[in-house]
Amino acid sequence: MRDVAIVGAGMLRFGRYPEKGIKDLVKEAVNSALEDAGIDKNIIEAAYVGSAVPGLMTGQEQIKAQVTLSAMGIESIPMYNVENACASSSSALNLAWTAVGAGIHDCALVVGFEKLYDADKLKSFMALGTAVDIEIAIKMLEDFQKKQGEDESILSADSGKSKSIFMDMYAYYTRKYMDRYGLTQDHFARLSVKGHKNGALNPNAMYRKEITIEDVLNSGDVAFPLTRMMCSPVCDGSAAVIICSKEMAEKMSQPPVWVAASVVGSGRISDDISDTLTRRLAPRAFEAAGIGPEEVDVVEVHDATTPSEIISLIELGLVPGEDAPEWIDNNELDINGRLASNPSGGLTTKGHPIGATGLAQIHEIVHQLRGTAGKRQADRPMVGMTHNGGGILGVDAAAMALHILKR
């Protein structure tokens, strides 16, 4: 494999844009990435576009890449439509990295977008709820619950109606980690405060206001221990990166950020909540990058709910589980702490337009490694990592992409 560099990164601030269509979303992110790279769109040899539910939300299916990119004058080149739940755009990056690394292309565009917000919240929640095996999901959860010997249902009566079914499932997994490692709702509230503090410094975040622990705990119950401020909001967004070969990167004005590892994995039907896709995939990523977890300086993890941040850090091997409460209490995950975790604010603050989420994580790490993250800049990071999961298969993530980047 050839060395592959990211030479341009751009995104549209995540939010709710009823006036914008998918062409608008993609155009803004792509133009931002092209401007960042200092190149013309004619240099791009192939495009990989990730999205999850535009068909359900807008009616546009099958040729989403061609429709959105041709509208801005990018035509004729090979285009690939990538759908992999919340991991759609990070999976698209993996495919583009493979092609450039193999010498098939020298320069590729990767895009992630989602038009997820709708005035009818049920429409959004139903779209999100399709990221499961719809034939067996409920029975799988019922059988799993029986094996655990628990009487209380994992899913509440309003799942998929006034909230996503994933919130109930996340809450269940979170309670298991609370029992195992001594984590409390207060610890999660502290993480939420950290996320909003970081988000207030991020011009691309949906929410840009600092909050207090009391704000988090009093924001409304979703499913214990989750409160509303611990759950990622439904929104629209887009992000894009431009990658190229080492030879081409040397000709660019922007300093390259190297893709040291790009791994994608899929879940399996299992009722063992201790054997997760994150735990299985992380060693592959570190081996591919030739580093250990202790060498990661800054990380963006998939915190669709606030507790997922610390759970993912534990499962990636970045934080010892038994020390997790102490890391939170001692602010070790702050921007200037031992490990800068979610300096962008994370999904619960920045927003989670599912198809765009993975590349937005990459966007943040690229700027952190360049030293151009502004007021949220970590202290001279050399190695960054992203963790982007999507969907549920059995009781585990259905899809996941991990990336390790170096400067």
Image (cartoon, rainbow, N blue to C red):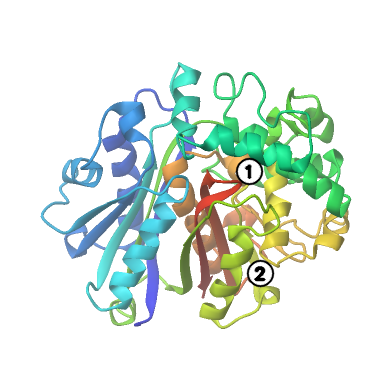
Side of 323 where 161 appears, left or right: left
Residue type at numbered disc 2: Asp
Tell me which residue sits at (37%, 67%) in the image: 7
Mark 2 surroundings: few (<14), some (14-19) or many (≥20) residues within 10 A? many
Q: Locate residue 90, reporting x and y percent.
A: 43, 56
From what the image shows, is residue 335 above or below residue 2? above
Q: Locate residue 230, reporting x and y percent.
A: 70, 36
Q: Which residue is mark 2?
A: 297
Q: Which mark is residue 130?
A: none
Q: Which of the two discs, 2 and 1, sits closer to the camera?
A: 2
Tell me which residue sits at (17%, 59%) in the image: 78
From what the image shows, is residue 52 above or below residue 292? above
Tell me the quarter of the image containing the N terminus.
Answer: bottom left
Q: Locate residue 236, reporting x and y percent.
A: 44, 34
Query: Is residue 197 something that shows in the picture?
Result: no
Q: Which residue is mark 1?
A: 199
Secondary structure under the numbered disc 2 in the rendered image: loop
Mark 1 surroundings: few (<14), some (14-19) or many (≥20) residues within 10 A? many
Q: Locate residue 205, reporting x and y percent.
A: 55, 41
Secondary structure under the numbered disc 1 in the rendered image: helix
Residue type at numbered disc 1: Gly
Side of 52 where 150 appears, left or right: right
